[in-house]
Image: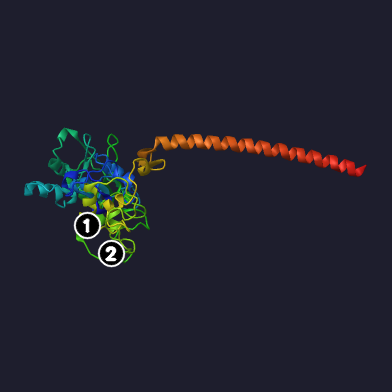
Amino acid sequence: MYVSACGKQVCNQSKISHGYQLLYNTSVNFGVCPHCECDLDCVARGDCCPDLFFSLHLSCIETMLLHQNNIYKQDTPLVLMVGNCNGKTKDRTRQCESKLTPGEHLQNGPVTSRKTGLTYRNKHCSKWFNESIKDLIPWSLEIDCLNFADFNFVSSYSEIISLATQQKCNIFYVVSDTVRQPRNCSTVTGDKGFVNKCNITGTWQNYDSSLEYACHHYDNRYKFFRNIFCFMCNPPELTPLISECNVTGYWDTYRADLLKACLQTSQSGITAPFKNYYCYLCNRNNTIESSKYMDAKIRISEWINKERHFKFDFHIEALDIKFIKDKTIYDMKVKDEFEKEKSRTFTIHIKTQEQSEKDKKCVTR
């Protein structure tokens, strides 16, 4: 279903059945689907392609281990991290995924890899991804108490939890400053007003559990939807479909593989009036120049690191230098013409005033 709307905008294109090979970036050619990336930094940015995202078994994990008071309002958000391992052995899977007691959690906190940048629920989850223990940076444990508590003389993890509970302490994990900050799940789920559930519009006709799962979990915003899948399960109203090539008469270069892709790829609910992404491509002029963005597409992310300083990331996804250059030259010409016109108009205005004064003197005499 994703391929029907977005084409081969995935990391592993070998799993797509038909043979149509795109000559250029799919996100540039059709604006329905958001741009996505295939490097592991995409997890922190929030722009992973779907096949990569779901292969990492990411989920939102709680970083607050014990919550006993509301005096200290630490920023302890849910964090997007690898929370499942899908391991070959039941023992490894259990160690990674099992719900732990607070005492056990003290010994199995989150870790972040300095090599891949991925954050794991615990060190056991990292084994499935062949991470070396020397590359894992453990998260720091912080304790804030409503009442005084001396932890210097406790001798076990269970005693730490017991004393913290008695003295109304909050225990939570904090990521190290030496690694890239993981993605906050409040960013993933979206602000109030974002569509993050299926069929809010009432236009979704055929229920698909996989599509619903993708809507609830995938991280890559699209307009005011949590992701492209939430848009798919809240589709626009149905319109008559264009399900063949060159119905519009605009197709400039015949390609048998594109025709086959249009006919064989299933229908998408979000590419209307075209049956799917490929039917769109073979009903338009597909020259490279007409496929570019007008200027640039850029994503700006703001990071707040422990309330001490701000960090901005600028990620340019598409850039048309030729357009920007031509536009700059054109704007300079327009400005120059405007200045000339303004000067010419001003001179005429002065002459008109002088003539008016002369006329007044003549009348007085």
Question: Label 1 sits on what residue type?
Answer: Ser
**Residue corresponding to mark 2:** 204
Residue 67 seen anywhere in this rendered image of the structure: no
Question: Label 2 sits on what residue type?
Answer: Trp
To which quarter of the image does residue 115 belong? Answer: top left
Q: Residue at 13% across / 41% down in the picture?
A: 127
Give the residue furthest to the top: 134
Which callout, 2 or 1, points at the residue further toward the start of the chain?
2
Give the residue furthest to the right: 365
**Secondary element at tag 1:** loop
Q: Position of residue 220 (x, y in %)?
A: 30, 49
Left or right of 355? Residue 139 is left
Q: Residue at 83% across / 40% down in the picture?
A: 357
Is 202 located above or below residue 297 in the figure?
below
**Residue corresponding to mark 1:** 266
CA–CA distance between discs 2 and 1? 16 Å
